[in-house]
């Protein structure tokens, strides 16, 4: 098996999938800068988008993009 020496860049994006999507639709598809490690009582984490916006998201809404 041959292993490439080329670096791999994985990008994560925010893909909301919920009933209150109207409030966060403007952030759909935006790249993610950071994700909080621990979930709150509602099973959501804080997500910081590359433009500085902060949203509360479920972990399944953070996807490879």
Image (cartoon, helix red, strand yellow):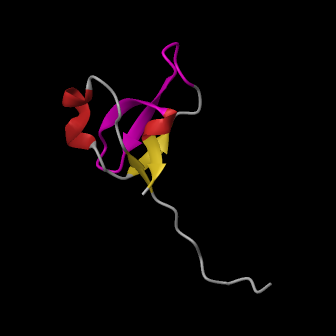
Q: Residue furthest top?
A: 41
Q: Position of residue 54 (x, y in %)?
A: 34, 34
Residue at left offset 46%, top offset 59%: 11
Q: Quadrant of residue 23?
A: top left
Quadrant housing residue 24: top left
Q: Residue at x 31, y 50 (%)?
A: 30
Q: Nearer the viewer, residue 51 or 56?
A: 56
Which quarter of the rendered picture does the N terminus lie within?
A: bottom right
Q: Is residue 55 magenta?
A: yes
Q: Residue furthest bottom?
A: 2
Residue 17 or residue 51, whichever sits in front: 17
* Residues rendered magenta in the picture: 39-58
Q: What residue is drawn where x is 76% and y is 86%?
A: 2
3 vs 54: above or below: below
In the image, farthest residue toward the right: 1
Where is residue 20 drawn, in percent x and y? 26, 23
In the image, what residue occupies the spot 59% across and 76% down?
7
Quadrant containing the C terminus is bottom left
């Amino acid at each position: 098996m041959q292993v490439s020496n080329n670096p791999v860049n994985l990008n994560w994006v925010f893909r909301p999938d919920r009933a209150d999507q109207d409030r966060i639709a403007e952030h759909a598809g935006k790249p993610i800068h950071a994700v909080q490690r621990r979930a709150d009582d509602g099973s959501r984490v804080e997500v910081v988008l590359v433009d500085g916006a902060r949203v509360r998201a479920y972990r399944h809404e953070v996807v490879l993009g």
